[in-house]
Amino acid sequence: MKKLAFSLLAVVLFFSACSKDDDNTTTPANSFTIDGKVATTPYGYKYGTPGSGAGVSFLTVPDSLVTNYTGTASGVDINMDTLINNQTFTYSRDDSSTYNKTKNFYGASVFYNASIINGEMKDSTGIQYNKPTGGTVTVKITGNIYTFDYSLQFDTKTITGKFSDTLTVVE
């Protein structure tokens, strides 16, 4: 009887552990979700000089090809003056009296399936958001691996994403 009870318990545990998780809404690494669509962004870049247009970008095409690229592309650009390990940055305009570069990012833009001709993005193509109204960016640094978890608000839209890999420095 003990063997039968143990066998039944094992079967119940097996099937309950293998149930489908319908609530899994996490964004895969190196991608972002916009209007229910997922864009894979395997290319990460760090650019600029802090205080004068610094930030990070995550793109669907390599940046080195963008100047001559014609096609569609998706990406996220986050303007921030510092990258501090284990820090969560919140959105604040850089001309705000409360802006603090160690706690805030000051801009962001997102584009999905936008048309690019010879490296120039065409306005009003694909989905584009350029004026954030809020959001958070969490930065973790382990060696040369940078992990960004971000949630960016643009009026009534929220774009969530994650990037975890090395960043190419663009001068």
Image: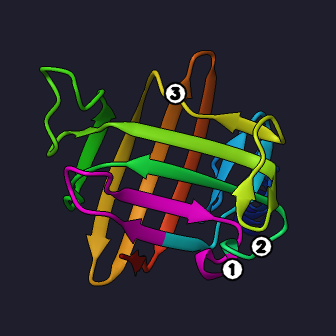
Where does the N terminus fall, quadrant-wise?
bottom right
**Distance of mark 1 from mark 2, alpha carbons?**
6 Å
> Vertically, is 21 above or below 116?
above
Q: Secondary structure at mark 2?
A: loop
Q: Is residue 25 found left or right of 52 in the rendered image?
A: right
Q: Tell me where residue 67 appears, x and y as whole percent.
A: 66, 73
User: Which quadrant of the figure has residue 126?
Assistant: top right
Other residues around mark 3 within 10 Å, as few (<14) / some (14–19) / many (≥20): few
Q: Secondary structure at mark 1?
A: helix
Q: Is residue 22 visible?
A: no
Instruction: Look at discs 2 and 3 and give the one toward the viewer.
Output: 2
Q: Residue at x 68, y 72 (%)?
A: 66
Q: Amino acid at mark 3?
A: Lys
Q: Is residue 71 found left or right of 98 in the rendered image?
A: right
Q: Tell me where residue 146 appears, x and y as whole percent.
A: 37, 71
The image's mark for residue 102 is none
**Distance of mark 3 from mark 1, alpha carbons?**
26 Å
Q: Residue at x 46, y 70 (%)?
A: 45
Q: Amino acid at mark 2?
A: Tyr
The image's mark for residue 131 is 3
